[in-house]
Amino acid sequence: MSPSAGGSVLLQDDARRSGDIAIDMDTKTSQQLQLIGEQDSYIQSRADTMQNIEATIVELGSIFQQLAHMVKEQEETIQRWAGVVGGDGEGVLWGMRPTSLFRSAAFPGRDSLPWMGE
């Protein structure tokens, strides 16, 4: 083509390329929209997962509170039992004194009893 017949060669080239660019832009735009859609679904999936994790953490907190309450109840029960039994062993020591006196009287000069294996 001559420049005089159809105008400037540069304008013709620009006109031809502008169609190519528009097609490329449409392709890029559709790819970008597709990526945005994929990102939106990924972000929504992540948000749902985070909500599930948060709900699980709240549930675990509740379980640990119940466990702490049960441990506290057991502590109170054990303290009551210790009070009845005499938690420091005074009752046992008090009961051993007469046995020790009997042993000394029954087996004078012996430090241990034959059945004690000493």
Image (cartoon, rainbow, N blue to C red):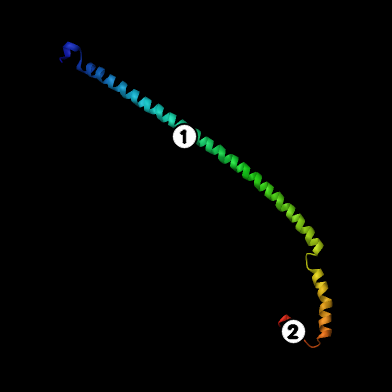
Say above or below: 32 vs 46: above
Amino acid, disc 1? Tyr
Between disc 2 and disc 1, the foreground one is 2
Spot occupied by residue 11 in the image (x, y as percentages of width and height): 23, 16
* Relative horizontal placement of residue 102, taking residue 16 as reference (left or right): right
Looking at the rendered image, the quarter that the N terminus falls into is top left
Which residue is disc 1 drawn over?
A: 42
Q: Position of residue 3 (x, y in %)?
A: 17, 14
Q: Is residue 70 left or right of residue 102?
A: left
Q: Residue at x 73, y 55 (%)?
A: 74
Number of numbered discs: 2
Question: Residue 7, how many percent across, how many down?
Answer: 20, 12
Figure check: 82 above or below 55: below
Task: Classify residue 36 as left or right of residue 116.
Answer: left
Q: Quadrant of residue 36?
A: top left
Q: Which residue is mark 2?
A: 114
Q: Label 1 neighbourhood size at 10 Å, few (<14), some (14-19), many (20+)?
A: few
Q: Secondary structure at mark 1?
A: helix
**Mark sitting earlier along the chain (2/1):** 1
Q: Secondary structure at mark 2?
A: helix
Closest to the observer, 25 or 109: 109
Report the Cα–Cα distance between label 2 and label 1. 82 Å
Name above or below for residue 71 compared with residue 50: below
